[in-house]
Amino acid sequence: GNSVTQMEGPVTLSEEAFLTINCTYTATGYPSLFWYVQYPGEGLQLLLKATKADDKGSNKGFEATYRKETTSFHLEKGSVQVSDSAVYFCALYSSASKIIFGSGTRLSIRP
Amino acid sequence: DTEVTQTPKHLVMGMTNKKSLKCEQHMGHRAMYWYKQKAKKPPELMFVYSYEKLSINESVPSRFSPECPNSSLLNLHLHALQPEDSALYLCASSHPLNTEAFFGQGTRLTVV
């Protein structure tokens, strides 16, 4: 079946550090891939998406590239800020109208 | 308007109470979802409505009863809940031709 695996957290970085959060998926066909972010006490916000192989999604300095050959969609940011502290979920959209989430990665940024 | 609005934001209810959660969107989306999220866990799908018809029920106990009165509204009726049902309940919507879902801020439910 379809599934998403993302790196265990928590991840703690200093401000302006480089961020990578790994995400790999298992799916039949060509699912759409997403990164959602959840700030404390809030719902989920769509951060970025990619709908086909080699697409790069980007938003607010974050990027992720849909790699079919490695079934990956790693999230990167060149210089993180304290305000980026949140939980990040990698997700895929399956053909059965379901969004399947990874377990989430908690990110904390030190000033 | 790209918002999904959920009310109430917080709800405390006893195990014998009946309450309802409400969700509204005006983006013309014809798919709407209820998710349940426990602390430090990802959201778990409960129900999917497509064109106002229930299309997916993820084996949710009958004490949770969804309703989709029209294309903009989604309700979740709650009755005889248990303390373990305490969680953040998230509503989401999506366009049939797109795959991304937009989430509301959630209702934080506490069952006492």
Image (tube, coloured by chain):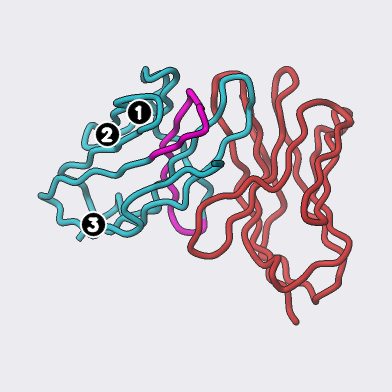
Chain colours: A red, B cyan
Q: Mark 1 highlights which residue?
A: B59
Q: Secondary structure at mark 2?
A: loop
Which residue is located at x 53 percent, y 65 percent? A40
The magenta-colored residue range is B24-40
Q: Earlier in the sequence, mark 3 or mark 1?
A: 1
> Which chain hosts label 3?
B
Residue type at mark 1? Ser
Q: Secondary structure at mark 3?
A: strand
Q: Mark 2 highlights which residue?
A: B61
Q: Are marks 2 and 1 in contact (CB under 8 Å)?
A: no
Whether residue B82 sits left or right of residue B96 in the image: it is left
Q: Residue A24: x percent and y percent?
A: 76, 39
CA distance separating discs 2 and 1: 6 Å
Residue type at mark 3? Val
Whether B48 is drawn above or below A104: the answer is above
Q: Earlier in the sequence, mark 2 or mark 3?
A: 2
